[in-house]
Amino acid sequence: MLLTILAYAMIIVFMYAIMKKKLSPFTSLVIVPLVFTIIAMVAGVAKKGNIGDFVMEGVKTTSNTGIMLLFAILYFSIMLDAGLFDPITEKMIRFAKGDPMKVLIATAVVAAAVSLNGDGTTTTLITCSAFIPIYKKLDMKLMNLAVLVILQNTIMNLLPWGGPTARAMAVLDVGPEILSYLIPGMILSLLYVICFVAPRMGKKERARLGIVNLTEDEILTMTTIQDPELLEIRRPKNFAFNAILTILLIAWLVAGSFIPAIGLPPLLLFLVGTCIALMVNYPNLKDQSSRIGANGGDAVQVVILVFAAGIFMGLFQGSGMADALAMSFTKIIPKQLAGFWGLVIALISAPGTFFISNDGFYFGILPVLAEAGRSYGFSNMQMALASLMGQAFHLLSPLVAFIYLLLRLTGLDMGEWQKESAKWALGIFVIFVVTLVGLGFLPFYIPQ
């Protein structure tokens, strides 16, 4: 009982510290769980073990992601320095012609397309690299960019190679046909973001900035680099090579998800890509060192947050607080809701996948919920579908590594970004639930 209270208290204190800016995300991720783990151990309610083991186990879960992010950030930073995205920026400015609405819709479309590989890091790097210069030149709000990226990746992350769907399939022993049940909701959600969310944002930006009919001279002024330091590191002659290298890298990442024989760890792909990019664009060793030094700070800022998230998970799970929280979910649900068990799982999955990692929720909580659901007449497929509904909010969690990259690139505050994104993510959650129930894939109620 005490461990459960500590688990809830830790989450409340953690979210309060983040939302009210009492602590930075980095210190919150480390200090808050550490304090509560020590309290649990002193009170004698924590699992057996020591804090060092808990921390190392947690760090292991995020180490590959952290190192991959290091080289992924360096790779795209080098491409940005070399000017790979300059032509894209120019074309987008010419397409928009000073209309923020067109830029926002284009952002939503590109974010959805890039998210096909199911990897949030790749989506963030590519979309932000292409669009941040445009947003800054048109004085648009980067908050809108960050929200659209996360919404589209949230939807596409439900593809089986994205992660949560594969976990639900494994735990409940359902086949790939689950995708056919998810596709209607995914399509409607994508249209919701592209045709409703982005235009709504666009109307506000139009009202704030207006539609500027840019002349050719104005477009040239916006797209021509004046800074001599930037001009010195640009490599326009290498555009074709850099574009082919980047496309090959992304294609390999995506193809590896479908064809195991050619699959390589993203860490290795970005590591090799970074080395090639440096050798071709900056053959001088001093220039290579300069580019690594100039971009290394941003990479380190993100990577330490990824490792801090691993420490949080290690302490939360190792101390037993995650298990206590999971069991409390099943005990506080009244049996009178048995006939609505599918909706119950859908509702639990929202806070469940926000406060606990996907592994913790799908391998720890879902089996317990599914055991009860089967006795109430719900099939494994129905419960698997219901458990995925909460993914609408999962990527807003401080435990998701790549969001620190997104926040770093856009310079946004986590609490404000979470509140803005959650407002629109609620629409995705509703669309999925209504679609599943409306098409008969998930029973609204089973008489007991």
Image (spheres, rainbow, N blue to C red):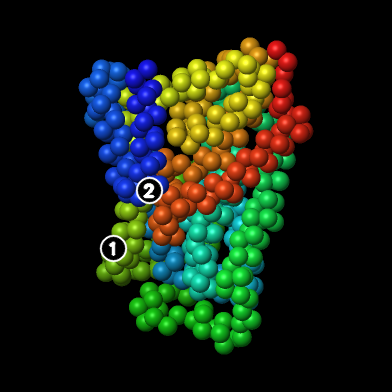
Decide if residue 335 is in sight here. yes
Is 368 rendered above or below residue 97? Answer: above
Residue 4 placed where, x, y %?
38, 22
- Name the residue rendered at 64%, 27% in the picture: 343
Residue 172 badge: none
Is 384 rendered above or below residue 412? Answer: above
Badge 1: residue crowd in 10 Å (few <14, some 14–19, many ≥20): few
| Residue sitting nearer the eye, 90 or 136 | 136
Residue 425 placed where, x, y %?
58, 45
| Residue sitting nearer the eye, 439 or 340 | 340
| Residue sitting nearer the eye, 378 or 115 | 378
**Amino acid at dot 2:** Lys
**Amino acid at dot 1:** Gly
Q: Which residue is mark 1?
A: 293
Is 249 rendered above or below residue 141? Answer: above
SS of the residue under disc 1: helix
Is 141 rendered above or below residue 314? Answer: below
SS of the residue under disc 2: loop
Residue 20 badge: 2
- Name the residue rendered at 60%, 15% in the picture: 335
Name the residue at the bottom extreme.
217
- Name the residue rendered at 48%, 37% in the picture: 354
- Name the residue rendered at 31%, 53% in the picture: 300
Tell me: 298 left or right of 158: left
Quarter of the picture containing the N terminus is top left
The Cα–Cα distance between marks 1 and 2, rounded to whole angstroms, is 33 Å
Q: Earlier in the sequence, mark 1 or mark 2?
A: 2
Mark in the foreground, 1 or 2: 2
Decide if residue 61 is in sight here. no
